[in-house]
Image (spheres, rainbow, N blue to C red):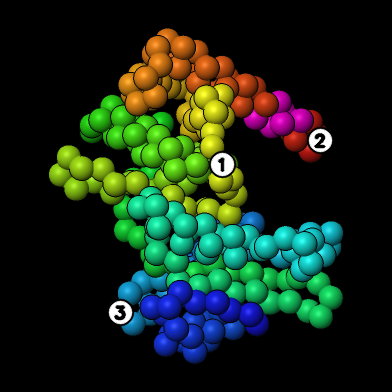
Amino acid sequence: MKIQLAPLFEDQKKKILSYLENFDHLGTLIGKGGRNKIKLFELDGKTINIKSFKIPNKLNQIIYKYFRKSKAERSFTYAQFLISKNIGTPAPIAFAENNSSILFSQSYYISEHLHYDLTYRELVTNPDFPDREQILRAFTRFTFRLHENGIEFLDHSSGNTLIQINDKNFNFFLVDLNRMNFKQLNFDERMKNFSRLTPKIDMVKVMADEYSKLIQRNSEEVFEKMWFFTNRFQENYQRKKNLKQKLKI
């Protein structure tokens, strides 16, 4: 097994390896454990989070072995970069990979487990959530900071931002980090980056209004573009969903 640890956790290598080797039998499972499994473990008085990525198909086993970094390695590297830019994400601890001599196999991303109050999804499902508009505006400023730092978070969706509330201060932390681009984003790319978050027009209006102040553009122009990409995503999503249902029938 190949493993790379953050410097602060080098002395915990033996313990972390024992958790990885016994991943199927130890730890507390979070969620249903479908495509990927996430389990909690204790490490030196802290709770850590180990994400086991699903073994890819044969073609991707070749790609990850020879041509592309694994999801676990990308998550680890991107987390370090986010922290260097003062962007919130659970502290990265390590990544590990199991490979045969020919093919890529299993990979794991290990990070500190973060306690949080809600995800963005609660703002979508509960229109009466306390301070909903203030959280949305703070989230928009957080996203603007991503964009200004040249970070395009491709999985910027409702479940991938954890939110901590401290009095009237809101702190945001990105998870599921393995898909990102790093470049200077144009206006359309910035607006498209909001498309996966919510289908609710009232939420888009709030985010567009806040973003327009930050980017110094007309609020109506920002809203129209943001809503255009949101609608397009929702239409594509529904089309794929309907197709899957037909294929099952």
Q: Which residue position is annotated with label 3?
A: 45
- Region in magenta: 237-243
Q: Position of residue 205 (x, y in %)?
A: 39, 18
Q: Position of residue 111 (x, y in %)?
A: 44, 67
Residue at image position (59%, 64%) is 72
Q: What is the number of the mark on residue 98?
A: none
At label 1, the amino acid type is Lys
At label 3, the amino acid type is Gly
**Nearest to N terminus: mark 2 or mark 1:** 1
State which mark lies toward you, 3 or 1.
Answer: 1
> Label 1: few (<14), some or many (≥20) within 10 Å?
few
- Give the position of the N terminus as an image quadrant: bottom right
- Spatial CA distance of label 2 from label 3 is 49 Å
Indicate the quadrant where residue 100 lies.
Answer: bottom right
Q: What is the number of the mark on residue 247?
A: 2
Residue at image position (35%, 60%) is 114
Q: Is residue 120 magenta?
A: no
Query: How many numbered discs sit on the rendered protein?
Result: 3
- Spatial CA distance of label 3 from label 1 is 38 Å
Residue 33 visible within the image = no
Residue at image position (56%, 24%) is 188
**Nearest to N terminus: mark 3 or mark 1:** 3
C-beta proximity under 8 Å, tags 2 and 3:
no
State which mark lies toward you, 2 or 3.
Answer: 3
Q: What is the number of the mark on residue 183?
A: 1
Instruction: Determine whether 4 is above or below 171 in the image.
Output: below
State which mark lies toward you, 2 or 1.
Answer: 1
**Nearest to N terminus: mark 2 or mark 3:** 3
